[in-house]
């Protein structure tokens, strides 16, 4: 009986202990559950924070990338802007230089035109002999002496000029006087040769224009058409030496056209006053320059002087037959006072004078 009581007491004690342990276990489980929930909440919060931070980081990275791109773009635009500015400056500088060159060229052209007008208006006319041949500008004695010197200079030897001077002294003629006269003669002959070249160009130009008119009339086409130019070039080249190039022919035709246009308008007699201009320098003038000279020359009619400056050989006559058939409109009556340049000039020019109206060629 006593054992049962003791067992019951131990049982009750064990039962109370179990109840106490259960209560503690329950509390512990509740604490653990609460801790788990808190941990889950904290983890969720941290996950949200991490997501937000990732988004912020991504945004910051995107902004940094844009800033880098913007920096590159700004630098590129800066370089391009600098290059554009440099190009603009170079272009402006080039244009300014071009403008300055054009202004300088126009000033030179104007000076050349004014110089030409002054020369042909006031220049001394080279003396024309009755037979229109190149004038003899020194006496026979001086010519013989000059010829002797020329022959000696042509000979081989470094002291040929000294020999010429010695012979000049032996002949009893002052060396400087004779040499200076020879120099003056050469200058006059050079002027005469230049005038002869210009006159030949004018003859060639007139023949070309007349032939162009004939072709246009035959073909019933415009005077300035390509067909007329092609036929004319073919006709002319067929009569020229075989070695004549197309480029040279075109150059000669253009020069002849310009020179004839100019002197046909201002008067062929003005050729006699040309001293400082060559045929090439005149032909380099533009049609605007030529028209300016024509407009600013004071005259009523052109006085055309028939000369033999460019008298072709018989062989040239055979090759260029139509060039020698230059038709002049000769006045059957004596020219009026206004048509004659001046009385003294007519006395000097013992040549056939013919009065024609100036033909102004349409300038292209």
Image (cartoon, helix red, strand yellow):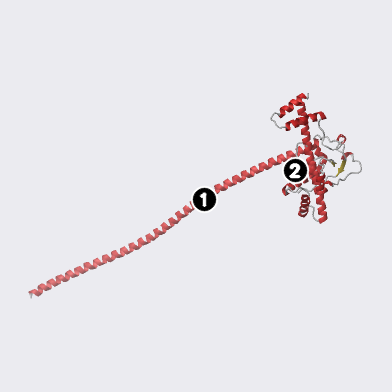
Q: Nearer the viewer, residue 120 or 74?
A: 120
Q: Residue at x 77, y 43 (%)?
A: 290
Regarding mark 2 in the picture, which secondary structure is present there? helix
Mark positioned earlier in the residue sequence (1 or 2): 1
Query: What number is the disc on residue 283?
Result: 2
What residue sits right under mark 1 in the picture?
Answer: 76
Residue 21 x, y percent position in the rendering = 20, 68
Residue 333 x, y percent position in the rendering = 92, 42
Q: How far apart are marks 1 and 2 (CA)?
A: 54 Å
Query: What number is the disc on residue 45?
Result: none
Q: Nearer the viewer, residue 138 or 299?
A: 138
Question: In this view, which residue lies farthest toward the right?
Answer: 333
Residue 157 x, y percent position in the rendering = 70, 30
Mark yes or no: residue 173 visible. Answer: no
Residue 309 vertical placement versus 79 (above, below): above
Q: How crowded is mark 2: few (under 14 residues within 10 Å), some or many (20 or more)?
A: many
Q: Residue at x 81, y 37 (%)?
A: 272
Q: Which residue is drawn at 11% across and 73% down?
A: 7
Q: Residue at x 82, y 51 (%)?
A: 213
Q: In which quarter of the image is the N terminus?
A: bottom left
Question: Residue 193 vs residue 336: left or right?
Answer: left
Regarding mark 1 in the picture, which secondary structure is present there? helix
Residue 86 x, y percent position in the rendering = 57, 45
On the image, which quarter does residue 164 sit in?
top right
On the image, which quarter does residue 126 sit in?
top right
Q: Which of 147 and 306 is in front in this view?
A: 147
Residue 353 vertical placement versus 146 (above, below): below
């Amino acid at each position: 009986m006593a054992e049962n009581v003791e067992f019951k007491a131990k049982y009750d004690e064990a039962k109370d202990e179990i109840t106490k342990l259960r209560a503690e276990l329950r509390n512990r489980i509740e604490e653990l559950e609460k801790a788990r929930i808190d941990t889950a909440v904290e983890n969720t919060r941290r996950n949200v924070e991490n997501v937000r931070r990732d988004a912020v980081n991504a945004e910051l990275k995107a902004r940094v990338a844009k800033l880098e791109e913007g920096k590159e773009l700004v630098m590129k635009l800066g370089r391009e802007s600098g290059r554009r500015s440099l190009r603009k400056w170079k272009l402006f500088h080039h244009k300014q230089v071009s403008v300055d060159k054009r202004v300088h060229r126009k000033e030179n052209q104007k000076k050349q035109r004014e110089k030409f007008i002054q020369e042909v208006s006031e220049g001394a006319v080279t003396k024309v002999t009755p037979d229109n041949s190149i004038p003899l500008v020194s006496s026979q004695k001086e010519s013989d002496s000059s010829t002797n010197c020329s022959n000696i200079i042509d000979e081989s030897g470094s002291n040929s000029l000294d020999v010429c001077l010695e012979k000049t002294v032996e002949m009893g003629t002052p060396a400087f006087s004779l040499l200076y006269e020879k120099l003056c003669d050469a200058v006059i002959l050079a002027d005469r040769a230049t005038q002869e070249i210009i006159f030949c160009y004018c003859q060639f130009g007139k023949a070309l224009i007349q032939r162009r008119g004939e072709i246009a009339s035959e073909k019933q086409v415009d005077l300035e058409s390509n067909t007329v130019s092609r036929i004319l070039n073919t006709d002319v080249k067929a009569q020229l030496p075989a070695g004549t190039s197309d480029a040279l022919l075109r150059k000669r035709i253009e020069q002849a056209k310009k020179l004839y246009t100019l002197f046909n308008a201002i008067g062929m007699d003005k050729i006699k006053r040309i001293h400082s201009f060559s045929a090439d320098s005149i032909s380099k003038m533009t049609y605007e320059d030529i028209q300016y000279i024509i407009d600013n020359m004071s005259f009523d009619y052109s006085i055309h002087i028939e000369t033999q400056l460019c008298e072709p050989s018989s062989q040239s006559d055979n090759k260029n037959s139509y060039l020698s058939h230059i038709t002049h409109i000769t006045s059957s009556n004596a020219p009026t006072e206004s048509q004659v340049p001046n009385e003294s000039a007519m006395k000097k020019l013992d040549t056939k004078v013919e009065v024609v109206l100036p033909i102004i060629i349409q300038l292209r």
